[in-house]
Amino acid sequence: MRVLLTTWGSRGDVEPLAGLAVAIRNEGGEAVVAAPPDEDFVALLARAGVPHVPLGPTVRSVVAGPRPPGAEEAFRLAPALVAARFETLMTAARGCDALLATGLMPAGARDVADKLGIRYVLACFHLLGLPSRHSAPGRRPGTPSDEGADLETKWKQDADRVNALYGDAVNTHRAAIGLPPIYNVRDYVFGDQPWLAADPLLCPSEGVTDLDVVQTGAWLLPDERPLPAGLEAFLDAGEPPVYVGFGSMASYTRKDIARIGIEAARAHGRRVVLASGWAGLTAIDDAKDCFVVGEVNQQALFQRVAAVVHHGGAGTTHTASRSGTPQVILPHIADQPSWAAKITELGIGVTAAPETLADALSQALKPDLRVRAQAVAPQIRPDGATVAARLLLAPQSEQAPGRR
């Protein structure tokens, strides 16, 4: 059985598909990933031995500018991505038995699957965008701003927003391949039974959305790479350092965040492992207590540090939680505040702002928080990708519907 997996988004959108593709291969199937052509993603998929079909522009060209993308950029990007999906996926999906889409509103993916008569699955890594009677679009259920809100109106406005971005482009391309128009792009993309690739402990789904979510657990890509020799030597040379890194948060990260992170760690007598990320963070001086790393095996590294300071992306949050190391999350956008709130609620980390990082790190370095983090770590399921792979590869008659 052959499956096409597709996404457009940051590393947190691409790496789970690599993990799922490996699991599909281990279960006897074949998977191809259509994803952005960023060098990082090309290397990631090559390392996993997963065939890659370039899709759309690089993500870095869109998000790594001096400021976050605004409405003007969104209205240029949306139709461009729709066109790229119709063109690229129509070719890549031929001969496939299923198409699974995720990432930034994958308008165009289901249309291709319907045209080719193959199975379609929409997957997500969090719940914030899924229609709900309990919370407003983009907000964590139960937040005060939801009290008394006309949620039905807000969700209709959300659907209208998606239609404004994608509707004309989708229907233009549908007409070109002989499909009738659709009038609610968001609900068509989601379908009735989206999959949730997130751990049930970190992201419980029961009762959160009106849709019938199939929760598989997170799709983790095993990483057996050794740490660089220089990093190993740095780790061995003293007490466990503090990790500071913000992934692909280039436009959203303060320009002085490296200084803030390094000085917060130094205030507690800790050394620092600083991840350069898409923001290109660098050391602030020539002191030997800071080691700068690029792309590295976080699964191995996080087990060797005293605390993980990060942005709260889904992938980093799962990896840090599985490591048993306390976290300090400085959320920037989208689902990140939700992950930060859950980590704080579970007692395995602290939510902070740049101005409060030193105080938050003081809490994270307390022994009782580490004990709690190590107790929770074994509860994070490692088999989500295998669960999803088996669901994709199972004959249609054996695919059990409903929540999992």
Image (cartoon, rainbow, N blue to C red):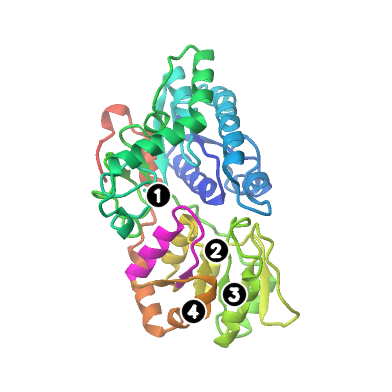
Q: What element carries label 1?
A: loop
Using the numbered discs, state the Cα–Cα distance from disc 3 to disc 4 in whole angstroms: 10 Å
Q: In this view, does 141 lie to the left or right of 331?
A: left
* Residue 393 seen from this side: yes
Which span of residues is magenta-colored? 327-346
| N-term mark: 1 or 4 | 1
Q: Which of 340 and 197 is in front in this view?
A: 340
Q: In this view, does 169 lie above or below 180?
A: below
Q: Quadrant of the N terminus?
A: top left
| N-term mark: 3 or 4 | 3
Amino acid identity at mark 3: Gly
Amino acid identity at mark 4: Leu
| N-term mark: 1 or 3 | 1
Q: Which of 184 and 369 is in front in this view?
A: 184
> According to the image, label 3 marks what residue?
261
Using the numbered discs, state the Cα–Cα distance from disc 2 to disc 4 in whole angstroms: 20 Å
Which is closer to the viewer, label 1 or label 3? Answer: 1
> According to the image, label 2 marks what residue?
298
| Residue farthest to the right, as pictured | 286
> According to the image, label 1 marks what residue?
138
- Measured as percent of width and height from the top left, residue 339 is found at 41, 60
| N-term mark: 2 or 3 | 3
> According to the image, label 4 marks what residue?
361
Q: Is mark 4 on a helix, strand or loop?
A: helix
